[in-house]
Amino acid sequence: MTPKHFLDLALLESSELRHILDIASGYKKGMNVAGGLAPLAGKTLAMIFEKPSTRTRVSFEVGMVQLGGHPLVMMGENSQLGRGETVADTARVLSRMVDGVMLRTDSHDKLLEMAEYCTVPVINALTDDSHPCQLMADIMTIEEHRGPIGGKVVTWVGDGNNMTNSYIEAATRFGFELRLCCPEELMVDQRYLDWAANEGGNISVVKDPKQAASGSDVIVTDTWVSMGDTDYDRRIELLTPYQVNSDLMGQAASDALFLHCLPAHRNEEVTDEVIDGANSVVWDEAENRLHAQKGIMVWSML
Ligand code: CP
Ligand code: NVA
């Protein structure tokens, strides 16, 4: 039987994603859901990091402990993976010893290779292409503050990156309108837009940030320089007009939420005034990584 991998939102049905969120919310409310208080007792999750992390590492590690299981952190450079052992061979070995593998890596192909050769579930904890775990926390946060996300207008302003790709998939699976406002040079890969169009997603590309933000229920952005990006100066030059500041927030609905997956580069992509302002829900969003992770782990590993 194929393991229940959590690789990308596009690969899962809307009903499965909703089920994961229900599990996550249940744990957040302290309800005894999906297998009791320690559903993952006796199980181990190998967590492989080939890129830095604060939220993802802490939320998976703490979440696994709270679920009664054991988290095993492997930093890429300190494992044989970092010395050239193949992903496939690593997958074969880990599958003999652990019950799940979480991978944060610089290449989406490595994630797919891990999933192909693992006989236990693999969870995408960020690649250069996507960050689906973060989207589960984002949807949970928006719904906690504003009710069901279906039909809401979410505007992405800034770099077209791994988060943006996952937002496209989330909009399509959860049925919200997504406006993308990115410099042309930093726009997402067309294949994500094509996929969404094919699946009936409501995604539009809007050039002007103010026009994109107009009347939006949610404004979301991310760092202008993601892990692995090297062209800092060019990015700052291109992205400066896309800063989320009070002026831009003023175009959105008066109760519009501000989200950011963090870490933030204050006064680059977002001003202090906005991230620390009354409409910012970034700390709830960060906390929800813990609850969302628990939903994902229980769904895939129980
Ligand atoms: N948002 C997020 O994934 O944060 P970390 O890089 O700290 O894990
Ligand atoms: N786009 C960012 C997200 C960090 C959580 C990056 O890949 O660095």
Image (cartoon, grey):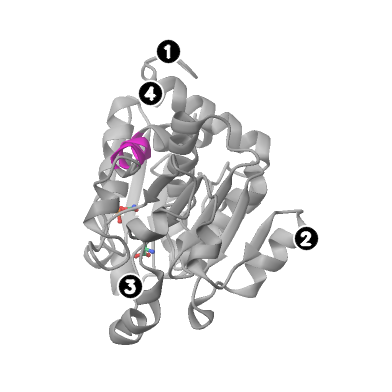
* Cα gap from disc 2 to disc 1, whole angstroms: 39 Å
Sequence-first tag of 2 and 4: 4
Ligand 2 resides in the quarter of the picture at bottom left
Identify whether 40 is placed above or below 217. Answer: above
Q: Which residues are magenta?
A: 283-290
* Cα gap from disc 1 to disc 4, whole angstroms: 10 Å
Q: In which quadrant of the rendered view does residue 38 lie?
A: top left
As shown in the figure, which amino acid type bears the numbered disc 4?
Lys
Label 4 sits on residue: 28
As shown in the figure, which amino acid type bears the numbered disc 2?
Asn
Q: Nearer the viewer, residue 9 or 238?
A: 238
| Residue 99 left/right relative to 179 | left
* Cα gap from disc 2 to disc 4, whole angstroms: 35 Å
Sequence-first tag of 4 and 3: 4
Determine the secondary structure under disc 1: loop
Mark 3 surroundings within 10 Å by alpha-carbon count, few (fewer than 14), some (14 through 19), many (20 or more): some
| Residue at the image point whose x is 49% and y is 45% from the top | 253
As shown in the figure, which amino acid type bears the numbered disc 1?
Asn
